[in-house]
Each structure stands twice: as structure tokens, then as C-alpha cells.
Image: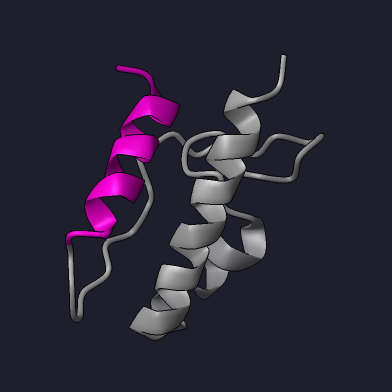
Amino acid sequence: MGALDLLAERVRDLDAIGGDDVPSPCVSICRMNPQTELCEGCLRTLDEIAAWGRMDDATRREVWVAIGQRLAKEHHQP
């Protein structure tokens, strides 16, 4: 299973997780893509990565929604 497949699975699993302790999207592949300015492992921006520890759960869920949208866009590109 590739990193993006793992991330997609975790996006789907997040819907089943309620309450506190929204997990980090990090998959330990920490490499920034200079074209997209997104981490190649978790599809977060540097700002999202840097702020993660200070985010409340609602904001973390918003980041996960953005990751899901980025994944959908990634899978629809040739």
C-alpha cells in the first residue's frame, strides 16, 4: 500500500472517529513537493504541519477535509 493509499484510508476512518484526539495525518514520509508546496506523505502545507500541535480538534478536522480534497484532486490528475 502506497503512502497516498494509506492516507486515503485514514481519511475514510476519520469519519468513524468522534470526539477528541483527532490523529495526525503524518505517515512518516516528510518531503515537501516544490511544485505543490505540500508534503508528499500527508498532503499538508508547511503552515498546517507547523500549527498542528496548537490546533483544536475542529481545526484539525478541517485540515483532514482539505487533505481529502487534495487526495481527490491527486487521483483525478493524469
Q: Quadrant where the C terminus lies?
A: top right
On screen, 22 above or below 57? above
* Rendering coords of residue 55 (x, y %): 44, 82
Residue closest to the eye, 12 or 40:
12
Residue in view at x 20 percent, y 80 percent:
20
Residue at (37% x, 38% y) in the render: 7
The answer, for residue 39, to whether it is visible in the render is no
Foreground: 48 or 57? 57
Q: What stretch is highlighted in magenta?
A: 1-16
What residue do we see at 37% from left, 52% from top?
25
Q: Is residue 53 magenta?
A: no
Q: Is any atom of residue 57 visible in this view? A: yes
Chief secondary structure of the magenta portion: helix
The residue at 66%/45% (across/down) is: 38
**Residue 46 position by quadrant:** bottom right
Q: Where is 43 relative to 34, above or below?
A: below
Question: Is residue 53 found left or right of 71 in the rendered image?
Answer: left
Foreground residue among 30 and 19: 19
Q: Residue furthest right?
A: 35
Where is residue 37, by image quadrant? top right
Q: Quadrant of residue 18?
A: bottom left
